[in-house]
Image (spheres, coloured by chain):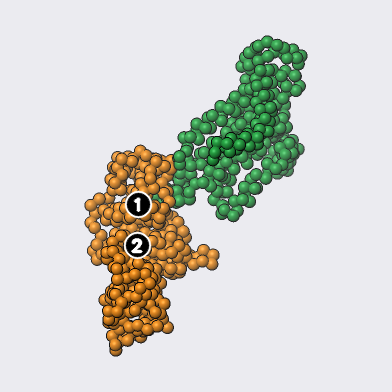
Amino acid sequence: MSLSAAKSQPGSARMDKIKVSARNIVKRFGATIAAADISLDIRDGEFLTLLGESGCGKTTLMRIIAGLEAVDSGAILIDGRDVTALSPRERNLGMVFQQYSLFPHMSVAENIAYGLRVKHKGEAEISKTVDEMLELVRLPDLRERRPAQLSGGQQQRIALARALATRPSLLMLDEPLGALDLKLRRQLQAELKRIHRESGTTFLFVTHDQDEALFLSDRVAVMRAGQIEQLDDPTRIYCNPANRFVADFVGDVTLLDCEYDAMRGGIALEGGGFAPMTLDVDRRCITLVVRPENVRLAPAGGGEGLACKVEDVAYQAGTTLCTVRLPSGAVLKSRGLGAPSPDFVLGGEALAHLDDCRVAFIREGPA
Amino acid sequence: MSRATEGKRNWAVWALLGPGLAFIALLLIVPVIDMTLISFRSESFGQILPGFTLANYTSLVRDGTYVQIFLQTFLAAALVTVLCILLGFPVASLIADAPAKWRGLLYFLVAAPLLVNTVVRTYGWLLILGRKGLVNETLAWAGLIEQPLALSGNYVGLIIGGTQVFLPFMILSIASSLVAIDRRLIESSAILGAGPVRTFINVTLPLAMPGVIAGSVLVFSLMLGAFVTPLILGGTAVKYLSVAIFTDALVLFNLPRATALAMVLLLVALLLYALQKRLLRRFEYYA
């Protein structure tokens, strides 16, 4: 594989091609529905993430694509070819599991070479590919080590190298960073992004960590109860959540049930309070998605704004997160740059402004 | 913790260990030393004479009968071990692949024969393998044989009986290794393009080796020391080491030679144990 493969850009000719297609996948385990008629197209070269809580069916969907799990109905197509009846070994895929699943009795080089040996490649080619892969994951000196002699992060990189060595059509990653500590996870996330770019391989990533999903992916599929709730790019998932569940699941959020008053040009909150904003909606009952960065706090007694009470002020390395309560009982969070302002003290009054240009709303309002 | 309480604790530990250690010293270490000494003495009509001699050991090498006994015994132990591996591995795989809730029952079924006394079990085999036993009667009834096959009172009977008696140890040992193998290693191998045979040879077998080795050493040393099975199923046709020791000690009253034979057996068992330690270290992947 060429290490200088073209960076995958949304909208490029490559990305218009469908690499893997899951069609009407249905899978039950007893009474549990792991996949309720899921259809999903993975574009060539993209980094797609299945995001959801444990038990939402994301891992099952991945295992079905891998051929490790049979479907009750539906079909899997790879490069346009129906592979539903094929075993995992016939699908030319790569997989990285959460727990380091390197072969413990083989050296790093033997692990990476395994898939190539199975495919009867020549020794010269195998050796060259092993070098390339170690270079790609930036661990060129570990060739002869045993997995037990590597750190968790190193093992996952070698697992990545082993999976990519066979040039798979699709690389699947099942919570590959889940067992690592936070700092290492951040580091490996950046590495993953680089490796995805440099290898040009299509990535299917599974995680329950929304930050990870938004940071890494070209597109994110938010899953719940065996269904895809929304499939979109990270910005739209965050700013234009398709429904209440997605809005609530992704990011820090307050969902404000309120009435939109087009005449007055603003929203009226339950329990009093009015916030001016222009929304392009035709219904009265809406739910506002309020993110911490949409809420601006002003000192009390200074004109307009929603009266509220400061409940918590937390400095979080670079930003300050204030938690305030509205008279209705609703809790808002406000994130501002820099250190806490002396204007806002615990138990004190403040005025909250909802910055309308960045406040998204959910199409499905309450009844 | 202060020195005084630590001292008190040590006392309590020794007081609790004392009876056990005393038993081991009296019933294991002292007799072994005693046996070792006797094996270097000579005897006359059951009387152990004073003095020192290597004759008991040199005769083992010079006397053709003893060489034959050793060869037959080691061959039987080796054969039984190999058969146990071949027959036990599939059963162990079945247990390891079974859902966790069934595993307990399967373990019990495998271990259940151990609850029956070996003498009883071996007589059971005699009923099956004898001249008028189940196998011969069935084959004769089916018209496959005219003369009954010699399945007991010989080497064949010994191997069949020994395999059945010691198979559970091999199965349990291999199964414990197989259960510990992460299923994702097998899945990784499949995704990387390997078929079931290749996955078995390259992944499953190397990772199951600790269980195979431990089981083999166990079965081999148990079979070397087996007494009831060779006596009943081997009959007089098979000269077995443990039977020879018994005959020397309690029929011929030649205690020095019996202890010399026993010392050889003990030495072999210790060597096997050392070998197992070495081999297992090679298969310690997770250290």
Q: Chain of mark 1?
A: A
Q: Element under label 2?
A: helix
Q: CA distance from mark 2 to mark 1?
A: 15 Å
Find residue A296 and report its horizontal and vertical position in percent: 29, 73
Find residue B15 and report its horizontal and vertical position in percent: 65, 35
Is A24 in front, or is A291?
A291
**Which chain, by letter, is green?**
B
Q: Is residue B40 left or right of residue B277?
A: right
Q: Is residue A159 left or right of residue B128?
A: left
Figure check: B185 above or below A337: above
Report the amino acid beneath label 1: Leu
Is B12 in front, or is A184?
B12
Report the amino acid beneath label 2: Asp
Q: Residue at x 36, y 82 (%)?
A: A269
Is the residue under label 1 in contact with that under label 2 (CB below 8 Å)? no
Disc nearer the start of the sequence (2/1): 1
Find residue A134 and report its horizontal and vertical position in percent: 30, 45
What residue is disc 1 on?
A: A184
Figure check: B279 above or below A31: above
Figure check: B83 above or below A249: above
Q: Chain of mark 2?
A: A
Q: Quadrant of the C terminus of chain A?
A: bottom left
Q: Element under label 1?
A: helix
Q: Residue at x 34, y 70 (%)?
A: A345
Task: Tell me where residue B148 sits by quadrant.
Answer: top right
Q: Which mark is residue A211?
A: 2
Task: Tell me where residue B92 sits by quadrant.
Answer: top right
**Which chain, by letter, is orange?**
A
Q: Is residue A217 left or right of residue B175?
A: left
Q: Residue at x 65, y 11 (%)?
A: B52
Q: Residue at x 34, y 53 (%)?
A: A183
Figure check: B279 above or below B33: below
